Image (cartoon, rainbow, N blue to C red):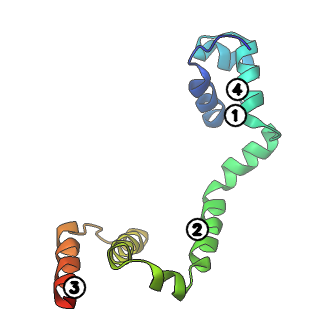
C-alpha cells in the first residue's frame, strides 16, 4: 500500500456526485494519480458496479422511504412501552416535526416546552 494522501474522501465524494467521471478525470480534480483513484474506488465500491451505483442514486429517495417504513413498522407497542418517558416524548416531538414538514406546515417546535412538560410529568408522578 502506498502512503496515505488524504484524498480518499474527495475521491469518494466526486464518484458519488459525478458517477460519469472517468478515473483520470477524478484524479485530475482530486490532484492525485489515477492509480490512487482506482485503489480508493476498489475499496469503496467493493462489488458494486457503476450501473448499480447509478441505479441506487436514481432511486435513493424511494430506497430510504422503504427502509424508513420497515424500521417504523418494526417498532411495536412493547418497544414503545419499554422506552423511558423522556425519549418517548422527544420521539413524539421529532415525529410531529417531520409530519408537519412533509405536509408543508411550520415545523418550529419549542423544545423548552417539551422539556418543561417532561419535568411536569415527573413531578406529578412523585
Query: Crowding at label 3, few (<14), some or many (≥20) Cα neighbours within 10 Å?
Result: few
Query: Crowding at label 2, few (<14), some or many (≥20) Cα neighbours within 10 Å?
Result: few
* Extreme residue in the front direction: 126
Q: Which mark is residue 121?
A: 3
Circle 3 or circle 2, nearest the eye = 3
Q: Are the residues at dot 4 and dot 1 in contact (C-beta closer than 8 Å)?
A: yes
Any part of residue 22 in sight: no
Any part of residue 118 in sight: yes
Circle 1 or circle 2, nearest the eye = 2
Q: Nearer the viewer, residue 44 or 99?
A: 44
**What separation in Å lies between label 3 and label 2 (alpha carbons)?**
30 Å
Q: Residue at 64% across / 66% down in the picture?
A: 67
Q: Secondary structure at mark 2?
A: helix
The residue beneath circle 2 is 68
The residue beneath circle 1 is 19
Q: Which mark is residue 21?
A: 4
Q: Earlier in the sequence, mark 3 or mark 1?
A: 1
Circle 4 or circle 2, nearest the eye = 2
**What separation in Å lies between label 4 and label 2 (alpha carbons)?**
31 Å
Q: Secondary structure at mark 3?
A: helix
Amino acid at each position: 500500500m502506498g502512503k496515505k494522501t488524504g484524498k480518499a474522501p474527495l475521491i469518494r465524494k466526486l464518484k458519488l456526485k459525478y458517477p460519469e467521471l472517468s478515473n483520470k478525470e477524478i484524479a485530475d480534480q482530486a490532484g492525485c494519480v489515477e492509480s490512487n483513484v482506482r485503489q480508493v474506488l476498489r475499496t469503496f465500491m467493493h462489488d458494486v458496479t457503476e450501473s448499480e451505483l447509478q441505479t441506487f442514486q436514481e432511486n435513493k429517495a424511494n430506497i430510504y422511504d422503504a427502509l424508513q417504513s420497515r424500521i417504523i413498522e418494526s417498532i411495536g407497542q412493547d418497544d414503545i412501552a419499554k422506552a423511558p418517558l423522556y425519549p418517548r416524548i422527544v420521539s413524539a416531538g421529532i415525529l410531529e416535526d417531520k409530519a408537519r414538514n412533509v405536509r408543508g406546515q411550520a415545523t418550529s417546535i419549542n423544545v423548552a416546552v417539551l422539556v418543561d412538560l417532561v419535568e411536569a410529568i415527573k413531578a406529578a408522578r412523585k
